[in-house]
Image (cartoon, grey):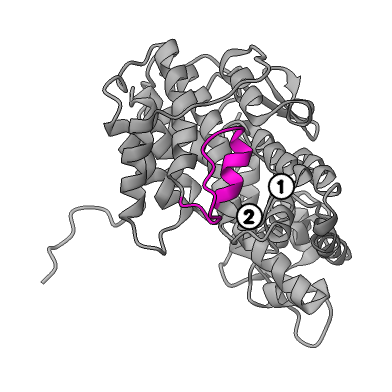
Amino acid sequence: MRDQEPAPMDAERRLSTREAAELLGVKPETVYAYVSRGQLSSRRVSGGRGSTFDAGEVEALARRNRRDSSGGSGLGDSGGGRSGGELSVRTRLTLIESDRYFFRGVDAVDLATRHTYEEVAEWLWTGRMLPGSTFTAPTAFVSVARRAVEALPEHAAPADLLRVATVAAATADPLRFDLSEDAVLGTARTLIPTLVAALPPRAHDRRDEGPMAHRLWTRLSMRKADEASLRALDGALALLVDHDLAASTLAVRVAASARAHPYAAVSAGLGVIEGPLHGAASGLAHRLLQDVLEQGDAAPVIADELRAGRRVPGLGHRLYPGEDPRARALFALLERIPRAEPALLAARDIVETTARHVPLHANVDLALAVLTVSSGMPPTAGETIFAVARTAGWIAHALEEYGERPLRMRPSGLYTGPRPPQPLPE
């Protein structure tokens, strides 16, 4: 039996914190957590303490929460039906539960702290651990990808560079339409180093050999890397390889279900990753952290963010009620880098200042910001790290999707426009 929907509320009606909490079925402090995450907007009570909330927004969030809790959002967990009324994606790659996440049943943090990015990627692709794994880019692929990237304007974003490099590399691969497992794995092992090699170097010594983290460093920082910094960058890549059905990964799975080749599937993921709620979120955290370092205090910076109606970046994650395990692991690696201490203290100040009112933990975007700020990298560096890392996960999902029957469900639009017939406009 379906839950009865409450009667629509007047969009102008304001709710108190207590009323909003009762409607949502949560504690009052959770209401403010929704505000910090950008899921609700609030208005301070004139001449008093507390806030009020738009009743329509609260009601809409309550409906979304009910759909999510009942599985009615359209994405199942691991069901097998692919042509019924509910889209369900079967995967053996990543499990997220109890503030932990696992790659093929193995704790992902343990994998990332004990193995290189390349080894973790191989594990995700094949279920085999191959110590000493390395990736090599064919010269022809790198050449065509670099020429394409060099033709872009200087202000092109990281996702632009990587997307263009991906398309260019595809044109150099006459076997790109071969969707057999061996062919797709071959694409994976050559595309990732091609993407890194196509990025313009910030340092004079462009590095195109060795571990991927070492090659990527020269594209992100002009500083000479120490071993602890390279280990932190490698750990970040390994931690970010996959995170179940994020928005970009779902786009990749849909493309792969239509039997798009791996380059096209990766391009679909890159098209989604550019949004501020996904791959670009670390750039917002980077700028926030820089502002705190410049002012020496998180309180006024956070106040400015909230006054402007923005959520505080780098805090909270809807999949982790507690601590984001990726942030915890990356912070541990960053603590081994002496020059990262000021950024680490600023990040702690951000968390502690916000925690006075909203109990939110740091997420991986804030940890990435500490890495990029302390390493002299630009604000877009976190997005580049994220995209390069996640390319391995996208190909793992594409490979898995190629083994499934194509999706037969075609979602229907819920039309809310004027009913026909309407007169033609004059």
Residue 130, position as x, y percentages in the image: 65, 14
Q: Crowding near pointer 1: few (<14 within 10 Å), some, many (20+)?
A: many
Mark 2 and mark 1: span between their CA atoms?
Answer: 8 Å
N-term mark: 2 or 1: 2
Q: Check disc 2 and report the residue beneath it.
A: 282
Residue 383, position as x, y percentages in the image: 56, 51
What is the quadrant of residue 304 in the picture? bottom right
Picture residue at 61% right of the left edge, 27% below the top: 118
Picture residue at 65% right of the left edge, 44% below the top: 65
Residue 114, position as x, y percentages in the image: 78, 26
Check residue 96 in the rendering and tell me which mark sits there, or answer none: none
Query: Considering depth in this image, is 5 or 312 the residue closer to the camera?
Result: 312
The quadrant in which the C terminus is found is: bottom left
Picture residue at 42% right of the left edge, 17% below the top: 402
Check residue 364 in the rendering and tell me which mark sits there, or answer none: 1
User: Which amino acid type is shown beneath numbered disc 2?
Assistant: Ser
Our reading of the magenta stretch's main secondary structure is loop
What is the quadrant of residue 171 in the picture? top left
Kindly give the residue lying farthest to the bottom in the view shown: 47
Mark 1 secondary-structure assignment: helix
The quadrant in which the N terminus is found is: top right
Query: Considering depth in this image, is 85 or 401 the residue closer to the camera?
Result: 401
Q: Is residue 28 visible?
A: no
Query: Considering depth in this image, is 158 or 366 the residue closer to the camera?
Result: 158
* Contact, mark 2 vs mark 1 (Cβ under 8 Å): yes
Q: Crowding near pointer 2: few (<14 within 10 Å), some, many (20+)?
A: many
Q: Which residues are magenta?
A: 200-219
Task: Indicate yes or no whether the magenta region holds residue 27.
Answer: no
Q: Is residue 215 visible?
A: yes
Q: Measured along the vertical axis of the image, is residue 355 above or below residue 426?
A: above
Residue 182, position as x, y percentages in the image: 44, 11
Picture residue at 81% right of the left edge, 54% below the top: 360
